[in-house]
């Protein structure tokens, strides 16, 4: 009887601990799901904005290559070059829940190894973002240096709507600060390298978006959420 009582007590305690761990696991998964859904929203907007920036720089090159531009084209040139830089920013990902789970040693709570592997693979791939961010920042700086040579900074300043920090096209027919073809060609080269990393970042964000979407579906099905 004593052996049976001890065995039963052990079984009850083990069952209770298992129940508590499954409950904690589900709480962590709910937090990871919130982060993943935030990533999906972020990457959707990121892809849209980066694509706008790439297309804007394409138009900037076409306009600068023209020997003569109308006042409307000159206004559009200033607007596009300013908005192209404003619309380009580094990709992001929300890793708070995963990092908390990893740092506390609670990844062991994930009872389904396939699910655990899928989660770890997603967050491991996000390490690429820091590399992309470094290149993007350097190439943005390189382009900005040549914008300062070619465009009149006072025109950019007049384009700011200070109430909401939006931008409007400039008035009139704002001239370039410099119309040297060699300098403009250097500007084109810098735009090319910036656009290249932006296209790379768009493709990475699409993969990130798709991976997060698949992982959300897996977690919702596995944990009945």
Image: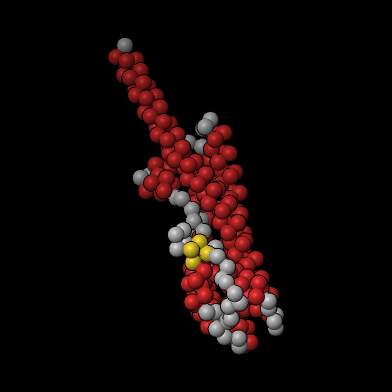
Say above or below: 174 vs 162: below
**131, 64: nearer the viewer:** 64
**Residue at point 57%, 33% (across, down):** 221
**Residue at point 39%, 24% (across, down):** 15
Mark yes or no: residue 166 visible: yes
Measured as percent of width and height from the top left, residue 70 is found at 68, 76
In the picture, the quarter occupied by the N terminus is top left
**Residue at point 48%, 72% (across, down):** 157
Measured as percent of width and height from the top left, residue 148 is found at 51, 80
Q: Quadrant of residue 66?
A: bottom right
**Residue at point 66%, 72% (across, down):** 72
Direction front: furthest residue: 172
Left or right, 165 with reference to 150: left
Left or right, 197 with reference to 106: right
Measured as percent of width and height from the top left, residue 63 is found at 67, 75
Say above or below: 1 vs 130: above
Mark yes or no: residue 131 visible: no
**33, 80: nearer the viewer:** 80
Direction left: furthest residue: 2
Left or right, 218 with reference to 134: right
Measured as percent of width and height from the top left, residue 189 is found at 61, 79
**23, 210: nearer the viewer:** 210
Say above or below: 188 vs 181: above
Say above or below: 123 vs 84: above
């Amino acid at each position: 009887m004593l052996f049976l009582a001890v065995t039963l007590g052990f079984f009850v305690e083990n069952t209770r601990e298992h129940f508590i761990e499954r409950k904690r696991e589900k709480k962590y998964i709910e937090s990871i799901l919130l982060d993943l859904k935030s990533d999906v929203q972020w990457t959707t907007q990121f892809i849209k904005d980066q694509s706008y920036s790439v297309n804007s720089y394409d138009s900037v090159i076409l306009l600068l290559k023209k020997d003569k531009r109308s006042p409307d084209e000159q206004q559009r040139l200033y607007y596009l070059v300013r908005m192209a830089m404003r619309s380009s920013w580094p990709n992001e990902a929300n890793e708070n829940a995963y990092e908390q789970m990893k740092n506390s040693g609670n990844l062991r709570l994930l009872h389904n190894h396939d699910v655990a592997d899928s989660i770890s693979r997603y967050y491991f791939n996000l390490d690429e973002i820091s590399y992309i961010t470094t290149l993007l920042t350097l190439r943005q700086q390189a382009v900005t240096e040549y914008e300062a040579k070619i465009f009149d900074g006072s025109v950019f300043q007049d384009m700011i709507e200070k109430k909401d920090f939006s931008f409007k096209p400039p008035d009139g027919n704002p001239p370039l600060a410099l119309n040297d073809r060699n300098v403009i060609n250097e500007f084109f080269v810098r735009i090319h390298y910036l656009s290249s990393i932006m296209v790379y970042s768009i493709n990475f964000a699409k993969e990130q978006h798709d991976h997060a979407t698949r992982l959300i579906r897996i977690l919702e099905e596995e944990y009945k959420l």
